[in-house]
């Protein structure tokens, strides 16, 4: 009773025969619990409402009622009722809400950290490709993207990018060789013409 909860035991007809009140002969003794409470308790869902049990309590209290059954023949041998002040239920819900908020913040923080790590891992090859593209624009075709062995779209993009870099580097080498050959071939007749002139 000091915790703010009342525990009462009723006989099969609903008469309160025991109470957790500290007084030997409390006000609840020998009062009868309403039949609607007993029927709801027997229904299998139990009884759980804020009520004064038709005047058994001086004010409205959150009350739960369940039947007590015999182990031998499953016959109802009584009922147990637990009640508490609505303020204690509000405190319980407040504690639950605080715990829910703390757990939600922890879960959101973990989700944020995991998504940050995952996004960094996903964007690392794309950032490397962007840097390589900038180097291509400056004429440096020797850069390649490191192949990490991924079997997803990023891995396919890395392979295609490296193949493109190989093709561009070959084309650039052929262009340089062609210009060098043309330059050499043009120098020989020019030297001869200059000699004749």
Image (cartoon, rainbow, N blue to C red):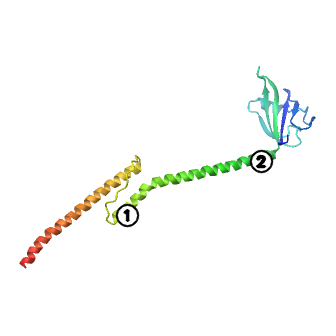
Q: Nearer the viewer, residue 33 or 4?
A: 4
Residue 115: percent from left, percent from top = 53, 52
Q: Estimate the spatial distance between the alpha carbons at disc 2 and disc 1, rounded to whole Å.
A: 62 Å
Task: Name the element at disc 1.
Answer: helix
Q: Quadrant of residue 35?
A: top right
How many marks on residues? 2
Badge 2 crowding class, 10 Å Cα cut-off, few under 14, some 14 to 19, many 20 or more, is few
Q: Is residue 117 left or right of residue 178?
A: right
Q: Nearer the viewer, residue 121 or 30?
A: 121
Task: Kindly give the residue lying farthest to the left in the view shown.
Answer: 196
In the image, what residue occupies the spot 69% across and 48% down?
99
Q: Nearer the viewer, residue 189 or 144?
A: 144
Badge 1 crowding class, 10 Å Cα cut-off, few under 14, some 14 to 19, many 20 or more, is few
Which numbered disc covers residue 171?
A: none
Residue 36: percent from left, percent from top = 82, 32
Which numbered disc covers residue 91?
A: 2
CB atoms of marks 2 and 1 within 8 Å: no
Residue 37: percent from left, percent from top = 81, 33
Task: Kindly give the residue lying farthest to the right in the view shown.
Answer: 25
Residue 50: percent from left, percent from top = 81, 41
Q: Is residue 97 left or right of residue 34?
A: left
Q: Is residue 193 above or below residue 50?
A: below
Q: Is residue 78 above or below residue 169?
A: above
Q: Nearer the viewer, residue 94 or 46?
A: 94
| Chain-order first, disc 2 or disc 1 | 2
Q: Quadrant of residue 78?
A: top right
Task: Name the element at disc 2.
Answer: helix
Q: Is residue 78 above or below residue 131?
A: above
* Quarter of the image with the N terminus in it: top right
In the image, what residue occupies the spot 29% across and 59% down?
168
What residue is shown with label 1?
134
In the image, what residue occupies the spot 63% across and 52% down?
105
């Amino acid at each position: 009773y000091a915790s703010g909860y009342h525990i009462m035991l009723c006989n099969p007809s609903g008469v309160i025969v025991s109470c957790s009140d500290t007084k030997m002969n409390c006000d609840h003794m020998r009062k009868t619990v309403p039949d609607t409470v007993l029927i709801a308790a027997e229904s299998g869902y139990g009884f759980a409402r804020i009520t004064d049990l038709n005047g058994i309590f001086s004010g409205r209290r959150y009350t739960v009622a369940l039947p007590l059954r015999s182990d031998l023949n499953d016959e109802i041998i009584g009922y147990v009722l637990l009640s508490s002040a609505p303020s204690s239920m509000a405190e319980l819900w407040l504690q639950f809400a605080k715990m829910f908020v703390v757990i939600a913040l922890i879960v959101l923080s973990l989700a944020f950290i995991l998504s940050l790590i995952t996004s960094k891992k996903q964007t690392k090859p794309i950032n490397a490709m962007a840097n390589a593209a900038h180097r291509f624009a400056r004429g440096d075709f020797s850069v390649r993207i490191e192949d990490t062995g991924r079997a997803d779209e990023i891995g396919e993009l890395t392979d295609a990018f490296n193949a493109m870099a190989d093709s561009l580097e070959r084309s650039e080498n052929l262009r340089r060789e062609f210009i060098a050959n043309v330059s050499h071939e043009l120098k020989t007749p020019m030297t001869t013409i200059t000699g004749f002139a």
